[in-house]
Amino acid sequence: MNLSDRIEAVEESRTVRFTPLIQQLRREGKEVINFAVGEPEYDTPTDIISATKKALDEKNTRYGPVSGLPELKQRLAADFEDYDENNIIVSNGSKQALFSVFQVICNPLDEVIIPRPYWVSFSEQVKLSGAKPVFVETIDHQLDCDAIEKAVTRRTKAIVINSPNNPTGAVYPENDLERISALVRNRGLFVVSDEAYDRFIYDNIRFCSMFHFKDIRHQTIVVRSFSKSYNMTGFRIGYIAASKTIISSLSKLQSHLTGNVCTFAQHGAVRALLSGDGQSARHGAEMARKRDIAYNRANQLFDCIKPRGAFYLFPNISKHLRPGESSEEFAARILERTGVAVVPGEAFGAAGHVRISYAVPEDTIHRGFDRMAGAL
Ligand SMILES: Cc1ncc(COP(=O)(O)O)c(C=O)c1O
């Protein structure tokens, strides 16, 4: 019996491909330094945990409203000028949010433009919607707006923007995003803006959301997450801010897809919003320091562009590749030889690179680079 063509056409996330090898090395008693992680090392703040426990004690354990708890949506809407709770839907992490967005906006054979390198799931989620991902190269990790404009055809439905970017850490400046907004307006497209790392910005630069561009608001779909900003990856809470029409379609889909997001986890999310502005100032300063340490160390080994956001480096490792060796084979070699796990660039559509996460303790960053330097 054949499975669906849709599922046969997608690949499992390559970011988890080395998990079995990591587990095996650990079983053998070897210490693995995990630069492949996609989450900050910090614990979930205790007040968020207490609020979640309290919600359980108060028996918030039943089905909830499909689009999310009103209190949570109201607080989230406050971040978006002129939006109210009907412009928000809460999702099981921003991963499910993005999956749902492509299901709701794409028809078979539509095209979705994705700047490359790109976060693993964009391409596969677009394919699962029946549409076709169209990749456009970036220049030094920044958008090539001319190339994006050239890639637009009559089948183009949407452009995906992910700033700060996973895997490169690039933050896109307002003037480039303004060009994208003009393109979106003139060609009648959607822009899907994945802002999962909006709280991870360094060097005092200003984060520009696609929401900033008023004249394309009805075409703009902003996706954000509690995962990294509040150290709540396991809570699985993300959300979408968009026009009421789009949100009501997403709600219709969600009513069949998952019903609602875990009720008591949403109470934890309300607490997160009450307690502060995401990543605390202390963590922000620490992350900036880690970025500097990791960048300086990586630059001695590889060709590396300094990231301004998120918590990843995406160096070019070509000069260390053996004849015919792929980045995936390189990553496997480094893991076996040194116990340092990185994610090969192929996972992000960019061979010749690896992604290094520096969301680990500072001494771990040093030890990981010491080991890699020894082996290379
Ligand atoms: C760019 C980007 N978008 C979305 C996600 C999904 O995060 P979550 O589902 O935990 O909100 C991730 C997770 O790594 C990511 O890197």
Image (tube, rainbow, N blue to C red):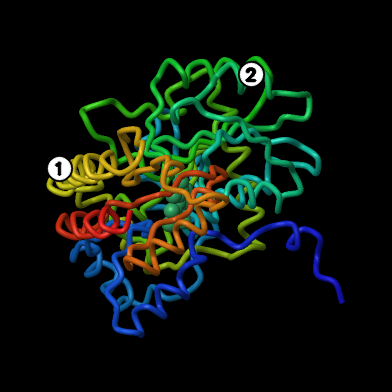
- What percent of the width, then of the height, locates residue 59? 36, 77
- Which element type, helix, strand or loop, lies under badge 2? helix
* Near-viewer residue (75 or 132): 132
Relative to 104, residue 209 above or below: above
* Near-viewer residue (68 or 191): 191
The answer to which quarter of the image holds residue 172 is top left
Q: Is residue 231 left or right of residue 327?
A: left
* Near-viewer residue (89 or 349): 349
Establish whether ligand 1 lies closer than 8 Å to the Cβ of label 1: no
Outermost residue toward the left in this view: 282
User: Few, some or many C-alpha atoms within 10 Å of disc 2 (few <14, some 14-19, many ≥20)?
Assistant: some
User: Few, some or many C-alpha atoms within 10 Å of disc 1 (few <14, some 14-19, many ≥20)?
Assistant: few
The residue singled out by tag 1 in the image is 285
The residue singled out by tag 2 in the image is 149
Q: Residue at x 21, y 28 (%)?
A: 204
- What percent of the width, then of the height, locates residue 373? 26, 53
Query: Can the viewer see residue 238 in this picture?
Result: no
Q: Amino acid at mark 1?
A: Ala
The answer to which quarter of the image holds residue 36 is bottom left
Q: Is residue 106 left or right of residue 222?
A: right
Relative to 85, residue 238 above or below: below
Q: Is residue 131 left or right of residue 93?
A: right
Considering only order in the chain, which callout, 1 or 2, is on the residue closer to the N terminus? 2
